[in-house]
Image (cartoon, grey):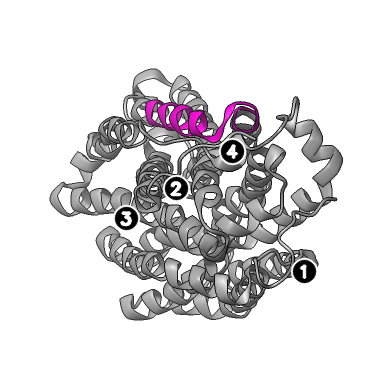
């Protein structure tokens, strides 16, 4: 059995959180740009609705690429260690994001512009597909079992930080630039900033040590994906179905609602961004609290509670959003994100505990990112199309999200508990 010294957990968690925040900044800034400006710039021959749908389609490509990234980087993580995954995924995502900010518009190079956008979004998703598994596993596998949920949840704050950073820059640009300036060059600034952030992330991760769980594996898997498919296929499908609701809720709040509020309700960009960002701040601050409850009462009960709240709240959420009143919109979005984080704060510990260490990086990441395809890739597109047919409250969107929540609730009900002290900690098989 090989061993290694254990680093400072706060330092390790901080480095993982910072890197996750930077990679999710890269991913989210594209979603915000898709909601606000990419349609007219890259699909000008389309109607406003069709242009928004096309921009969201390129957004969805990133989710399709994420499972492929989890296979690629999961193979590296299970064969060569979690640490190389953190470096490679950050470099790929950062480079692709900077390149998005340099792509000429349709007016300059024609159809090549949206095709380049599509390719770079695919590369973004490929990198992010490896990031989550590497960052979460490295922290979770160093953490003591009794507080694994808490420590593993800290990288889960990274998406909130990345979202706030991306939208904070967009909000500042929207408030200080004219619409013409924002469309001409302002939207590119956050993409260019990704290059500097990637350098910072690589510097923070330079001294991370390898996971003890990986070092203690007697024999690494030769083909991790083959082992996952052969021995854990049912688990992968259940976790993907269970996590779909989290992605659907999060991206309906942070991406679709932004486009809906600005384009359909006539709410200003600044007001919509402020409502969403305020809700995300509270969601991020609540993450460690939900994780502690998961350590105390179990992972599965927290997921069942969060999923139930999501199923009940989606119709009230769209009704509050349709009022166009900032405080009511904020309330609707906030409760939805509370439901989301009740589940996703514990997922960082839950998924790794479901898989044996030799295939953990592949299994957990593939299940996590397949959930993104089911819940995240289609939600902005489906919600935009459903809302277009509604003259008042977009009830179709609410029922769509409720249906996903019910599906996920059934999947969570079929998953076992894993928290130490609640039941045995051994991972399960298919």
Question: Which numbered tag is attached to residue 66?
Answer: 4
Is any part of residue 394 visible from this angle? no
In space, the residues marked 4 and 1 are separated at their CA atoms by 24 Å
Q: Residues within 10 Å of mark 2 (few under 14, many from 20)?
A: some
Q: Quadrant of residue 19?
A: top left
* Residue of label 1: 410
Element assignment for label 2 = helix
Task: Work out whether mark 2 precedes mark 1 in sequence or the reverse, and give the earlier one.
Answer: 2
* Residue of label 3: 164
Front-most of 412 and 312? 412
* Residue of label 2: 48
Residue at screen point 72% across, 70% down: 409
In space, the residues marked 2 and 4 are separated at their CA atoms by 28 Å
Element assignment for label 3 = helix
Front-most of 286 and 296? 296
Q: Quadrant of residue 413?
A: bottom right
């Amino acid at each position: 059995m090989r061993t290694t010294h254990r680093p400072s957990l706060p330092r390790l968690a901080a480095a993982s959180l910072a890197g996750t925040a930077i990679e999710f900044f890269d991913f989210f800034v594209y979603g915000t740009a898709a909601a606000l400006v990419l349609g007219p710039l890259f699909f000008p021959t389309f109607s406003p609705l069709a242009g928004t749908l096309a921009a969201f389609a390129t957004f969805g490509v990133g989710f399709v690429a994420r499972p492929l990234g989890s296979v690629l980087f999961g193979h590296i993580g299970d064969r060569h260690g979690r640490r190389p995954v953190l470096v490679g995924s950050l470099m790929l995502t950062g480079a692709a994001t900077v390149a998005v900010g340099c792509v000429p518009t349709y007016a300059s190079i024609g159809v090549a512009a949206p095709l380049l956008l599509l390719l770079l979004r695919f590369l973004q998703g490929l990198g992010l597909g490896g990031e989550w598994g590497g960052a979460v596993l490295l922290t979770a596998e160093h953490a003591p079992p009794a507080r694994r949920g808490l420590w593993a949840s800290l990288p889960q704050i990274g998406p909130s930080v990345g979202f706030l950073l991306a939208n904070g820059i967009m909000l500042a640009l929207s408030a200080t630039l004219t619409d013409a300036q924002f469309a001409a060059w302002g939207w590119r600034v956050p993409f260019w900033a990704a290059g500097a952030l990637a350098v910072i992330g690589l510097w923070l991760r330079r001294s991370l040590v390898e996971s003890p769980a990986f070092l203690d594996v007697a024999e690494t898997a030769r083909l991790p994906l083959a082992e996952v498919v052969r021995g854990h296929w049912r688990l992968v499908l259940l976790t993907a179905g269970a996590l779909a609701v989290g992605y659907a809720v999060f991206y309906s709040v942070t991406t679709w609602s932004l486009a809906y509020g600005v384009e359909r309700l006539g709410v200003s960009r600044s007001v919509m961004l402020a409502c969403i960002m305020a809700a995300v701040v509270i969601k991020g601050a609540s993450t460690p609290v939900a994780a502690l409850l998961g350590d105390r009462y179990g992972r599965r009960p927290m997921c069942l509670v969060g999923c139930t709240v999501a199923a009940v709240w989606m119709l009230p959420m769209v009704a509050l959003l349709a009022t166009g009143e900032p405080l009511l919109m904020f309330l609707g979005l906030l409760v939805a994100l509370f439901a989301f984080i009740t589940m996703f704060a514990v997922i960082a510990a839950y998924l790794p505990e479901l898989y044996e260490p030799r295939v953990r990086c592949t299994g957990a990441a593939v299940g996590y990112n397949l959930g993104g395809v089911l819940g995240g890739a289609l939600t902005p597109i489906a919600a935009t199309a459903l809302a277009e047919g509604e003259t008042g409250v977009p009830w179709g969107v609410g029922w769509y999200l409720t249906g996903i929540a019910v599906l996920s609730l059934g999947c969570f009900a079929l998953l076992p508990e894993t928290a130490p002290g609640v039941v045995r900690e051994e991972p399960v098989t298919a």
